[in-house]
Amino acid sequence: MKKGVLAIAALALAIALIASTVYAAETSTNKFAEFWRKLFNYPAGVARETVETAATATKGTADTVVKTSSAVADTVTGQPERVKDIVVEPVKGVAETTVNTTEKAVKIPVDAAQEQ
């Protein structure tokens, strides 16, 4: 029984210490507190940057599909000059999306570590 109470007390003390340290990080420039604040904020920053990168990639893919579909529709409805766009738009769109996504993915760790 005593061991259980001591374990709960030790756990409560550890939680209180971490909570007070995180609170201090928000209100001061204590190096120890700053370490904890950065440690807890970095994963959130990585997640935010990853979502933004995925959104950019999805938008680029959707734009490519729309442009290609438009070219196909125009070709079918009697605009044969758009035939080249059926091939050019997907290649161009994939290349642009790949470049943009790669650039953003490389910057994720740096952007996530920046202060808010």
Image (cartoon, rainbow, N blue to C red):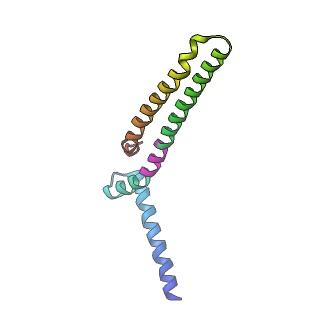
42 displayed left or right of 83: left
As drawn, 32 above or below 87 = below
Residue 43 percent across, percent down from the top left = 44, 51
Report which quarter residue 39 is drawn in.
bottom left
As drawn, 6 above or below 44 = below
Residue 1 percent across, percent down from the top left = 53, 89
64 displayed left or right of 113: right
Q: Residue at x 38, y 40 (%)?
A: 106
Residue 11 percent across, percent down from the top left = 47, 74
The front one of 31 and 107 is 107
Q: Residue at x 41, y 37 (%)?
A: 102
Q: Residue at x 48, y 26 (%)?
A: 91
Taking the magenta stretch, the answer to whether it contains residue 70 is: no
Can you name the residue that lies furthest to the bottom here?
1
Which contiguous range is marked in magenta? 41-49
Report which quarter residue 77 is drawn in.
top right
The front one of 106 and 52 is 106
Magenta: main secondary structure equals helix
Residue 53 percent across, percent down from the top left = 48, 38
Q: Residue at x 66, y 11 (%)?
A: 78
